[in-house]
Amino acid sequence: MIVNFSPPAKISTANIYLIFKDINSVMQTYLINDNDKIANNTFKNIPTGSNVRLVAYTLKEDKIYTYSSNMTIKENETLTLALKETNANDFKTLINN
């Protein structure tokens, strides 16, 4: 699965997590955007049909931006996420849940 962010976001780095609900496990990767060369934004060897929660976050201009969604893994999927500005309390709730 490849994870991208909406182009207007101009994200330089982001943490991305897949939380597997049924096996109490987490996979993590991160996106690095170096002069529009995207790296490390791919999850590999994920079982198709897995029920997961996708969580992503980044800091930009001292503000927190997040994305969270429940989903089922599909083969060779590419996602483009739209991050939303999140206050510190909502971010803590997102991470703790």
Image (cartoon, rainbow, N blue to C red):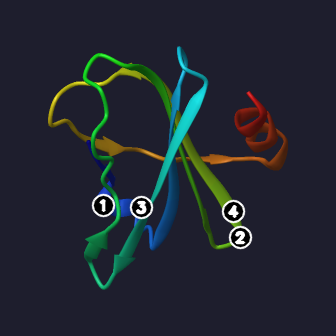
Q: Quadrant of the C terminus?
A: top right
Is mark 1 in CB contact (under 8 Å) with mark 4?
A: no
Q: Residue furthest bottom?
A: 35
Quick one: 33 or 75, which is closer to the camera? 75
SS type, badge 4: strand
Image position, residue 54 (x, y; %):
48, 34
Q: What residue did someone put label 3 on?
A: 9
* Mark nearer the N terminus (1 vs 4): 1
Q: Is residue 60 left or right of residue 71?
A: right
Is mark 3 in CB contact (under 8 Å) with mark 1?
A: yes
Mark sitting on residue 41: none
Query: Marks 1 and 4, how far apart in space?
Result: 18 Å
Query: Marks 3 and 4, how far apart in space?
Result: 12 Å
Q: Is residue 89 above or below residue 49?
A: below
Is mark 3 in CB contact (under 8 Å) with mark 4?
A: no
Inspect the image, locate mark 1, and give the three-letter code of the amino acid beneath it: Pro
Q: What residue did someone put label 1 on?
A: 7
SS type, badge 2: loop
Q: What residue did someone put label 2 on?
A: 62
Image position, residue 85 (x, y; %):
62, 49
Residue occupying image coordinates x 46% and y 24%: 52
Q: What residue did someone put label 4 on?
A: 63
* Mark nearer the N terminus (2 vs 1): 1
